[in-house]
Image (cartoon, rainbow, N blue to C red):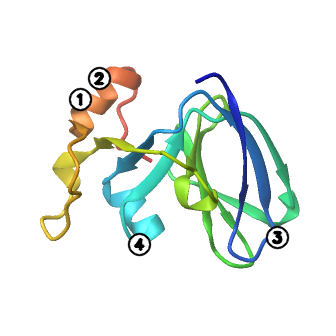
Amino acid sequence: MGTKRLQAKCLCGGVRIDADFETLDVGVCHCDTCRRWTAGPFMALDGASNVVAAGTDLIATYSSSGWGERGFCKVCGTSLFWRSLDAAHYAMSATLFDGLGNTQLTQEIFIDSKPSWYAFANETEQMTGAEFFAKVAPQQETPHG
């Protein structure tokens, strides 16, 4: 596919973010923190690079763990991104982008935290929280955040 530059915006339009993505697959996190933060599972495009934001004075961040923080719009409350504290890794809310085209839901993490009262119809790669940490952050001892 190659790198694709996408533009995102929050509900009020005060925050706009441009970012590059290698893939446009959507992943879902079912961890307790993500569900509380987004009022549902966090659906994200992972691996954003060359992230450039406008309206940065409207972006607030919350350090939700010792290694990650969540960004949101101070005006409308839109969940914008999860990023590592060093800003080397971004997962941006898929709902920020218009016209994602043939995007597919391909992965669910923290499947062991998903409540029984919802489920997605398509088949995805699924990982428990422990499997996720073993794959991407084996040195981390804290829960997803």
Q: Secondary structure at mark 1?
A: helix
| Residue at 30% across, 42% down | 109
User: Which residue was labeled with disc 4?
Assistant: 39
Q: Secondary structure at mark 3?
A: loop
> Is label 3 or label 1 in front?
3
Task: Compare residues 7 and 44 and report the one nearer the observer.
Answer: 7
Whichever of labels 4 and 3 marks the residue nearer the N terminus, that label is 3
Q: In the rendered structure, are the residues bearing label 1 and label 2 in contact, judged by CB atoms less than 8 Å apart?
A: yes
Give x and y (percent) for residue 4: 68, 33
Horizontally, is 40 left or right of 83 in the view?
left
Whichever of labels 3 and 1 marks the residue nearer the N terminus, that label is 3
Category of crowding for the residue at label 1, using alpha-carbon neighbours closer than 10 angstroms: few (below 14), some (14–19), many (at least 20): some
Horizontally, is 141 left or right of 59 in the view?
left
User: Which residue was labeled with disc 3?
Assistant: 14
Q: CA distance from mark 4 to mark 1?
A: 24 Å
Q: In the rendered structure, are the residues bearing label 3 and label 2 in contact, judged by CB atoms less than 8 Å apart?
A: no
Q: CA distance from mark 3 to mark 2?
A: 37 Å
| Residue at 39% across, 21% down | 139
Category of crowding for the residue at label 3, using alpha-carbon neighbours closer than 10 angstroms: few (below 14), some (14–19), many (at least 20): some
Horizontally, is 142 left or right of 125 in the view?
right
| Residue at 12% across, 65% down | 116
Q: CA distance from mark 1 to mark 2?
A: 5 Å
| Three-letter code for the amino acid on which mark 3 is drawn | Gly
| Three-letter code for the amino acid on which mark 2 is drawn | Ala
Q: Quadrant of residue 49?
A: top right
Whichever of labels 2 and 4 marks the residue nearer the N terminus, that label is 4
Horizontally, is 125 left or right of 83 in the view?
left
| Three-letter code for the amino acid on which mark 4 is drawn | Ala
User: Which residue was labeled with disc 2?
Assistant: 134
Category of crowding for the residue at label 2, using alpha-carbon neighbours closer than 10 angstroms: few (below 14), some (14–19), many (at least 20): few
User: Which residue was labeled with disc 1?
Assistant: 131
Q: CA distance from mark 2 to mark 4?
A: 27 Å
